[in-house]
Image (cartoon, helix red, strand yellow):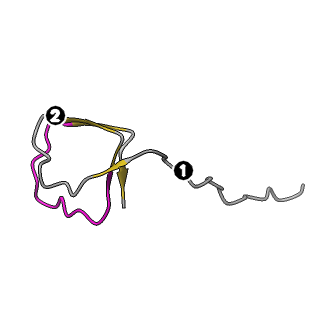
Amino acid sequence: MAKATIRKALIDRIILHDRVDDDGVSLRSGDAREAERYAGSDLDGRDLTGSTLKECEFS
C-alpha cells in the first residue's frame, strides 16, 4: 500500500482595505472598535477585557 503524502497548508495573505490608522494609546477595557490598523502598537500588559475589535489589523 502506498504511503499517504501530507501537504503543507497554504493560507492566502489577508489584505484589509480602508483601515484607519490608530496608535492604540486610547484603547480601553470594553471598547468597541472597527476597521482600525494598529501598526507597531505595544499592547503588552494592557487590560482589554470585554473589548470588541472587528476587522482590525495588528502588525
Residue found at the far right of this picture: 1
* Three-letter residue code for mark 1: Ile
Quarter of the image holding residue 52?
top left
| Quadrant of the image containing the N terminus | bottom right
| Residue drawn at (36%, 61%) of the image | 59
Q: Position of residue 17 (x, y in %)?
A: 49, 46
Q: Position of residue 2 (x, y in %)?
A: 88, 57
Q: Nearer the viewer, residue 44 or 35?
A: 35
Q: Which residues are magenta?
A: 37-51
| Residue drawn at (11%, 49%) of the image | 26
For label 2, the SS is: loop
Q: Nearer the viewer, residue 44 or 28?
A: 28
Magenta segment includes 38: yes
Question: Is residue 26 positioned above or below 29 on the image?
Answer: below
Magenta segment includes 57: no
Q: Which residue is mark 2?
A: 50
Label 2 or label 1, whichever comes before in sequence order:
1
Question: Is residue 17 positioned above or below 33 on the image?
Answer: below
* Three-letter residue code for mark 2: Gly
Question: Is residue 37 positioned above or below 52 on the image?
Answer: below
Horizontally, residue 8 falls left or right of residue 45, namely: right
| Residue drawn at (13%, 55%) of the image | 25
| Residue drawn at (53%, 51%) of the image | 15
Disc number at residue 14?
1
Horizontally, residue 36 falls left or right of residue 47, namely: right
Q: Report, in whole angstroms, how far the alpha carbon at label 2 lies from the one at label 1.
A: 25 Å
For label 1, the SS is: loop
